[in-house]
Image: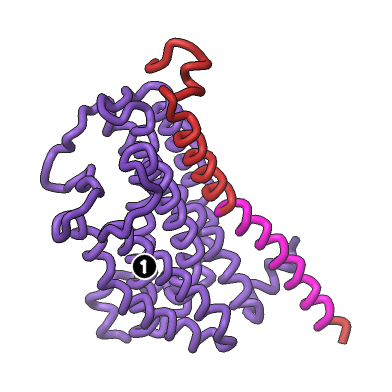
């Protein structure tokens, strides 16, 4: 432990304490709630009323403002779930297991959002709700991976075993993330390539991509809020025998 | 503003159904993901309080 402490920062060990996590998330929540509301309201009004219509797709293009953020978030959430699961496996960190468990239902619903908005957008644009295309199929597999993790958590009674099996499944499923990302480049696909790339300027004009960026950041704030709410419930439930939780219950 | 009138805004150039349906689904999923853990917290707190009372009475 003392040797580990030299190369790992202090907050990494504080993260391992459920009580510290419960307190810090309690302090962070209000800020993220305000940021989430501001960004999402601004983003939605901007997307629906002020962003210009696409010259080919017309107003159905406005679906991009929820489709792209939900698709990005569904993948980020999966990566966090797998990393937290790995930390839980390696360091036997309870809080990491709880983070991984809390990620699953959020990720599953956001993946459903990405698939549903994509299907609705596909109808007027491609003339079909669904095609068995590489991008769409790999995204559907992402949803099934989330459902698998949720099923493991509810099927295995023992919390430690459940967390371990869910972590292994998430780590194996991690191979799907680059497949989703590069599916539009590796295979012939109807799906258009990425809107945002780290290395290049977006192909669309700023009037279109600035509100999209606002929505993406808004979705991340939403994720932070939802995850912290779920994590706090999980901490209370799993630490119910700890002295500080008893005090907290008695006080109210 | 990209629209001249309210009715044009709702019509979305003939794609109204698609646009509004996707925004409705998105909003429902976002709200659900916030309401669900908030409701769950109430349940957790009452459950734990009941458990604590039971332990003390015995």
State the extent of the magenta-drawn residues as a range. Answer: B33-55
**How many dots with numbers?**
1
Identify the residue shown where x is 50% and y is 80%. A152
Q: Picture coordinates of residue A106 (x, y %)?
A: 48, 60
In the rendered structure, the residue with mark 1 lies on which chain? Answer: A
Please state if A219 lies on the left or on the right of B24 as rendered.
left
The answer to whether residue B45 is seen in the rendering is yes
The answer to whether residue A17 is seen in the rendering is no
Please state if A209 lies on the left or on the right of A203 as rendered.
right
Which one is nearer the viewer's eye here, A213 or A116?
A: A116
Please determine whether, in this image, residue B7 is positioned above or below residue A115.
above
In this figure, which residue is indicated by the disc labeled 1?
A: A141
Q: Which chain is red?
A: B
The secondary structure making up most of the magenta span is: helix
Which one is nearer the viewer's eye here, B46 or B26?
A: B26
Residue A91 inside the magenta-drawn segment = no
The residue sitting at the front extreme is: A127
Residue A138: image quadrant is: bottom left
Q: Picture coordinates of residue B25 (x, y %)?
A: 52, 45
In the rendered image, the quadrant that contains the N terminus of chain B is: top left
Please state if A38 lies on the left or on the right of A125 as rendered.
right
Secondary structure type for disc 1:
helix
Please determine whether, in this image, residue B2 is positioned above or below residue A187.
above
Identify the residue shown where x is 25% and y is 60%. A134
Q: Picture coordinates of residue A70 (x, y %)?
A: 39, 50
Q: Picture coordinates of residue A190 (x, y %)?
A: 24, 49
In the rendered image, the quadrant that contains the C terminus of chain B is: bottom right
The tint of chain A in the picture is purple
Identify the residue shown where x is 60% and y is 77%. A239
The residue sitting at the top extreme is: B4
Please state if A94 lies on the left or on the right of A82 as rendered.
right
Which one is nearer the viewer's eye here, A231 or A127?
A: A127
């Amino acid at each position: 432990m003392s040797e580990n402490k030299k190369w790992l920062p202090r907050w990494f060990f504080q993260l391992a304490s459920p009580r510290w996590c419960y307190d810090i998330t309690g302090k962070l929540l209000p800020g993220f709630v305000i940021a989430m509301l501001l960004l999402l309201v601004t983003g939605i009004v901007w997307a629906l009323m002020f962003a210009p219509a696409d010259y080919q797709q017309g107003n159905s293009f406005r679906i991009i403002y929820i489709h792209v953020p939900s698709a990005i978030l569904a993948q980020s959430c999966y990566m966090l779930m797998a990393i937290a699961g790995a930390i839980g496996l390696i360091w036997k960190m309870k809080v990491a297991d709880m983070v991984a468990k809390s990620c699953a239902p959020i990720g599953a619903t956001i993946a459903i959002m990405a698939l549903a908005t994509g299907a609705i957008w596909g109808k007027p644009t491609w003339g079909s709700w669904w095609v068995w295309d590489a991008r769409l199929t790999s995204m559907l597999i992402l949803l099934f991976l989330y459902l698998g993790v949720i099923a493991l958590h509810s099927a295995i009674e023992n919390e430690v075993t459940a967390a371990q099996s869910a972590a292994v499944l998430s780590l194996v499923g991690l191979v799907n993330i680059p497949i989703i990302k590069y599916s539009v480049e590796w295979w012939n696909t109807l799906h258009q390539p990425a809107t945002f790339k780290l290395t290049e300027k977006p192909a669309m004009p700023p009037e279109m991509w600035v509100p999209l960026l606002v929505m993406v950041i808004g979705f991340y704030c939403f994720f932070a809020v939802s995850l912290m709410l779920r994590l706090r419930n999980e901490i209370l439930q799993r630490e119910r025998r700890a002295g500080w939780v008893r005090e907290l219950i008695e006080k109210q | 503003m990209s629209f001249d009138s309210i009715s044009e805004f709702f019509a979305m150039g003939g794609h109204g159904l698609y646009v509004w349906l996707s925004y409705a689904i998105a909003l429902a999923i976002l709200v659900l993901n916030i309401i669900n853990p908030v409701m769950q917290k109430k349940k957790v707190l009452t459950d734990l309080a009941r458990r604590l009372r039971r332990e003390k009475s015995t």
